[in-house]
Image (cartoon, rainbow, N blue to C red):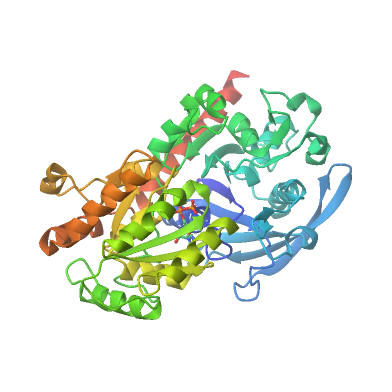
Amino acid sequence: MTDLLRVFVCTSEAVPFAKTGGLADVCGALPRALAQMGCDVRLVLPGYRTIDRGKFGFRSIGQAEVPLGADRVTVQFYESRLPDSPVPAYLIANDHSFDRQGLYGEGGRDYPDNLERFTIFGRGTLALLRHLDWAPQVVHCQDWQTGLLPVWLRVEPRDRVLAEAGTLFTVHNLAYQGLFPADRLPLTGLGAELFTPRGIEFYGKINFLKGGLVYADLLSTVSEQYAREIQTAEFGCGLEGVLRERADALVGILNGVDYGAWDPSNDPLIPARYTPDDLAGKVVCKEQLQRSLGLTVAPRIPLIGMITRLADQKGLDLVAPTIETILGRGAQFALLGSGDPAYHTLFREMGARQKGRASVTLGFDDALAHRIEAGADMFLMPSRYEPSGLNQLYSLRYGTIPIVRRTGGLADTIVDAAPDALDRGAANGFVFEPYTPEALLGAVTRALTAFQQPAAWRRLQSNGMRQDFSWKRSAARYIDAYRRVIGGRSQGARRV
Ligand code: ADP
């Protein structure tokens, strides 16, 4: 078939190969859904040390030299497939850049040569296309790590393989921009004429994310609410002006959930399975979670879970001053997270003070994340901002009632358990708005009260568990976006 939509997904992380956050979930699931819907989609990411090439069946398919300023750097190409899918997956390897412990940094500090690393990755992805002699219609870039691709594709001469390629740039988190000192611009191969406020300059620095925002054919972000929010000074991280200028080319597409991995009816990582019609398994999951985390084992004590990067974005400065009050009201708390060392210390000390009532696991543990989703009664996401958020959607499916702040994707997906919403069968969680400890405490208190009314609680669980946030719907919207990119390019071509 020659008329399949040809899409090249470029990303710095994708499940199951490498993950630090939701970006990886999206890039693991979206290509699979696109393939099921008939796209010729391929995926590329850096060949990090942490990716077990043997386990995933990656084989070497060649190498190329790519420019890094005046130098040439050798990258190796590896090919396999996204597991259980027809989607070809490629790694761009370069030991100096990617044979390291972390993806972007270590010990809470970014690697100082991230400009070089992700320039090499970006140049490598273009070299890979030439090597494969495969001409995508859309290069779908994600976040700052791939922000220079739309710039190169716009300003540099193209060969036959890249002739048709349009670009979609998806913002998963506007706060991470890839900022670098101006004197390193030559390494990117871009000329000083681009280093202006209308180009990739940002308060005297190079801004990779801005490159994507300014030069991509179409922009998307991961919820409609976040698409609106990032055009304001409060959420725009200094780029709101650029985004407002491109508002007509910006769409919001909510992330989907990979129910193949996140569904309590067939999740191999939880101790017992359950469905909306029979929640007996959830009782077992809770008991085992309490036991394994050293919490008092008791089915009627409400257990609040939280799984998160320990970053300011996630509302931890609201949790810190309120959590002991919440525990004092008879709840338990299970936190799994890693990130900012200051939060590690703060929560480690809190966990030590509250033995039996609070459990704090510092680290990244996918299996425990599943067990918390299944075993907790409530899930806390008091984010300052949340582009899409996945954990609230996982929580819905696991019958674990989300308590969220009304922002971004949380605002788009969680309906507060106010009486009228309960009556309509729409309510699926508890929502608060002001970014204050009092507001958080108010929502948690309402949730704890509702938990004491089993029939109403059961209704809330059922509402959420029956909702469908699968990738199919989101993937269809991405296909619309790809068609818009392609349509725009052919119109542009006709105009000249
Ligand atoms: P973000 O992308 O901002 O980190 P999301 O809610 O969109 O937030 O996605 C977070 C993803 O990362 C979820 O799949 C969540 O379960 C996972 N996650 C975050 N921290 C951890 C951790 N410490 N251990 C295991 N999984 C984690």
Number of callouts: 0
Q: Name the residue rendered at 72%, 33% in the picture.
A: 205
- What's the residue at 65%, 76% (across, down)? 54
**On screen, residue 409 above or below 91:** above
Closest to the observer: 197 or 353? Answer: 353
Measured from the top left, where is residue 190 in percent x and y?
A: 78, 34
Q: Nearer the viewer, residue 332 or 481?
A: 332
Question: Is residue 203 visible to us here?
Answer: yes
Which quarter of the rendered picture does the C terminus lie within?
A: top right
Q: Is 407 displayed left or right of 10 in the figure?
A: left
Compared across the picture, whether 62 is left or right of 450 comes to right
**In the rendering, at what x and y percent does residue 441 appear?**
31, 50
Residue closer to the observer: 439 or 283: 439
From the top left corner, tell me how far across and down residue 401 is, in percent.
27, 58
Instruction: Choose top left, top right, bottom left or bottom right for residue 436.
Output: top left
Residue 299: quarter of image: bottom left
Residue 121 location in percent, x, y?
Answer: 71, 51
Q: Residue furthest right?
A: 70
Query: Of all residues shown, which one is farthest toward the top?
Result: 495
**Residue 263 seen by the camera:** no
Point 16% across, 44% down: residue: 421
